[in-house]
Image: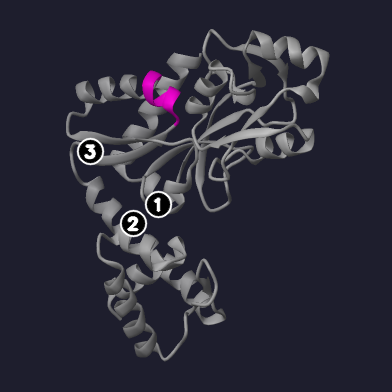
Amino acid sequence: MNWDDLKYFLAIATAGNLYEAAQQLSVNHSTVFRRLESFEAQLDLELFDRNSKPYSLTADGERLLIIAREAEAALLKIDSQILGVRATPAGSVKVSAPANIASNVMPIVMRSLRVEFPDISIDLSISDSYSALEQRKVDIAFAAVSSPPEHLYGSYLVTLGWWLYGDKSAHKAYKKNPKSVNLIAPSTGLANNEVSKWISEQNNEVVAYCDSYAVIAKMVKLGIGCAVLPEDQTFEELTAIVRIPAVYGQLWLLAYSEIQKQPHVLVVWDAIIAAMAEEYG
């Protein structure tokens, strides 16, 4: 069996469609389609239900997924062992982080790495969710979750309070009638589902959705509505109206365990934890 066949299979299983799988593999979707057709013919099995959106695995596909992930982990372990013999860790590490951490913490990380590990570079993307990690597009991701998902390795970073924020006029309006203020809600792609649940329970009018807490904070600043935000992602002009105890305030660093153990990734991991301690105490 060609490892590339399993690589294409894993990409489709992760992405749920040919187009996103093609993006992950840097090929066009017709190539992914042909490789899947050929692989299924070779095995004489149907691996995906293509009538569902996203693609769902058949029973045979589910069984193969377990084996394919074991094979992927074994190859990554080999790669990790090869990297481990290097005297100095080197390579590029892809990290996704919320805008505020990208601005306040990651430059500290990059500065320390340039001094101690000049052969390591960071490819930084801005995101409030860890979906890119699930899709294997990044190596490390920050996530606001109550605990790491079972299939991911995590390090607890800090607990942040979550508040309903608004401008001064919204604060006064909320005190008179909590149902009178409009809300700005996170899009479904954001990781913290407790926020969406709390908003749905209020029955206030939702006037906008967004997949960035930094952008949501700017909307609040402009008086578009109120929003539930972590206390480190706000502006001085915003007013904390009420704390939301139902929303978990834990921030975690996440990665697949076999990736996190790679020497160059581990160096970045440790540097992030040290910088978070410096920034948040």
State the SS at label 1. helix
Q: CA distance from mark 2 to mark 1?
A: 7 Å
- Residue 52 in percent (x, y) is at 55, 73
In x, y percent, where is residue 63? 52, 76
Q: Which residues are magenta?
A: 98-104
| Direction from residue 1 to residue 272 in the image, left or right | right
Q: Position of residue 189 (x, y in %)?
A: 53, 45
Tell which of 183 and 27 is nearer to you. 183
Label 1 and label 3: CA atoms lie apart by 16 Å
Name the side, left or right, on which 128 lies relative to 85: right
Q: Earlier in the sequence, mark 1 or mark 3?
A: 3
Answer whether residue 99 is magenta in the image. Answer: yes
**In the displayed structure, does residue 6 sit left or right of residue 55?**
left
Specify few, some or many for label 2: CA neighbours under 10 Å numbering under 14, 14-19, or 20 or more.
Answer: some
Q: Which mark is residue 258?
A: 1
Q: With respect to residue 83, does 279 lie above or below?
A: above
Three-letter amino acid code of the residue under disc 2? Lys
Q: Residue at x 50, y 40 (%)?
A: 129
Please tell me whether the stretch drawn in magenta is mainly helix, strand or loop. helix
Check residue 272 in the rendering and tell me which mark sits there, or answer none.
none
- Are the two marked residues, 2 and 1, in contact with CB atoms closer than 8 angstroms? yes
Q: Among all residues in the image, which is located at the extreme right? A: 176
Secondary structure beneath disc 3? loop
Residue at x 61%, y 40% (from the top left corner): 147
The residue under the point 58% across, 12% down is: 238
User: In which quarter of the view is residue 196 placed?
Assistant: top right
Q: Which residue is mark 3?
A: 89
Name the residue carrying label 2. Answer: 77
> Does residue 3 appear anywhere in the picture?
no
> Which amino acid is tagged 1?
Glu
